[in-house]
Image (cartoon, rainbow, N blue to C red):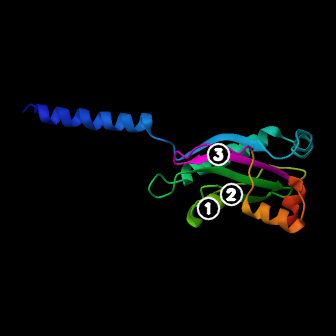
């Protein structure tokens, strides 16, 4: 029994559809850039093993790629995932998505990063991943300003250097 032309057309259509989806699909998570939020001299002093920091950043990216669910389960957004690391394998995450993200998405992102072992550091370091969720656009801002940071700056009544700001809202 020979398959009919309709069956062939159906199979070809399905295969082409899958190919087109894989070629043109937007990734669930995309890193546009990594932004170091402290001077290079501070980072060099506090990060004894640059490869270990690079591995940690890659593990965050991998965790996000696995964690971020495709549309329509999670929104399309561009923003920053801000990470601070202290000695003793301590980390903290803040988010800065100008378009806003749901509390559920924020929780998923923070939980995914919290499960990872941070890089070994000798002092506080702060960096951000400039990201797109579900094809979200690259943020036009060059650096993040999470709401918690803005509130701390307003409370202090003056501009604060990043390390001092983070220490003020994330004491040991």
> Eyeballing the image, is 160 above or below 129?
below
Identify the magenta region.
125-142
Magenta stretch: residue 131 in it?
yes
Q: Is residue 74 visible?
A: yes
> Eyeballing the image, is 152 above or below 55?
below
N-terminal of the pair, mark 3 or mark 1, is 1
Magenta stretch: residue 144 in it?
no
The crowd level at tag 1 (other Cα within 10 Å; few <14, some 14-19, many 20+) is: some
Whether residues under marks 2 and 3 lie with C-beta atoms below 8 angstroms apart, the answer is: no
User: In what quadrant of the picture does the N terminus appear?
Assistant: top left
* Residue identified by numbered label 3: 139
**Residue 31 percent across, percent down from the top left:** 63, 42
**Residue 106 percent across, percent down from the top left:** 61, 61
Q: Residue at x 74, y 51 (%)?
A: 144
User: In what quadrant of the picture does the C terminus appear?
Assistant: bottom right
* Residue identified by numbered label 1: 106
Q: Is residue 170 visible?
A: no
Between the residue at mark 2 and the residue at mark 3, the CA separation in whole angstroms equals 13 Å
The front one of 91 and 71 is 71
> Eyeballing the image, is 56 above or below 155?
above
N-terminal of the pair, mark 2 or mark 3, is 2
* Residue identified by numbered label 2: 95
Q: Residue at x 20, y 37 (%)?
A: 10
The crowd level at tag 2 (other Cα within 10 Å; few <14, some 14-19, many 20+) is: many
Identify the secondary structure beneath mark 3: loop
In this image, 120 relative to 137: left or right?
right
**Residue 143 percent across, percent down from the top left:** 75, 47
Whether residues under marks 2 and 1 lie with C-beta atoms below 8 angstroms apart, the answer is: yes
**Mark whose residue sits in front, 2 or 3:** 3
In this image, 25 relative to 6: left or right?
right
């Amino acid at each position: 029994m020979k398959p009919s032309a309709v069956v062939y057309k159906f199979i070809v259509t399905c295969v082409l559809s899958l190919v087109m989806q894989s070629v043109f699909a937007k990734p669930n998570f995309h890193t546009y850039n990594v932004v170091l939020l402290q001077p290079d001299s501070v980072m060099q002093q506090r990060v004894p093993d640059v490869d270990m920091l690079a591995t940690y950043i890659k593990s965050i990216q991998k965790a996000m790629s696995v964690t971020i669910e495709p549309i329509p389960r999670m929104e399309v957004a561009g923003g920053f995932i801000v990470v601070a690391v202290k000695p003793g394998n301590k980390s903290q995450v803040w988010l800065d998505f100008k378009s806003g993200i749901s509390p559920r998405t924020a929780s998923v992102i923070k939980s995914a990063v919290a499960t990872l072992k941070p890089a070994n550091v000798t002092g506080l370091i702060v960096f951000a991943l400039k990201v797109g969720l579900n094809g979200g656009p690259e943020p036009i801002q060059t650096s993040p300003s999470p709401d918690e940071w803005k509130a701390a700056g307003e409370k202090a009544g003056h501009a604060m250097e990043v390390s001092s700001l983070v220490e003020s809202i994330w004491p040991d």
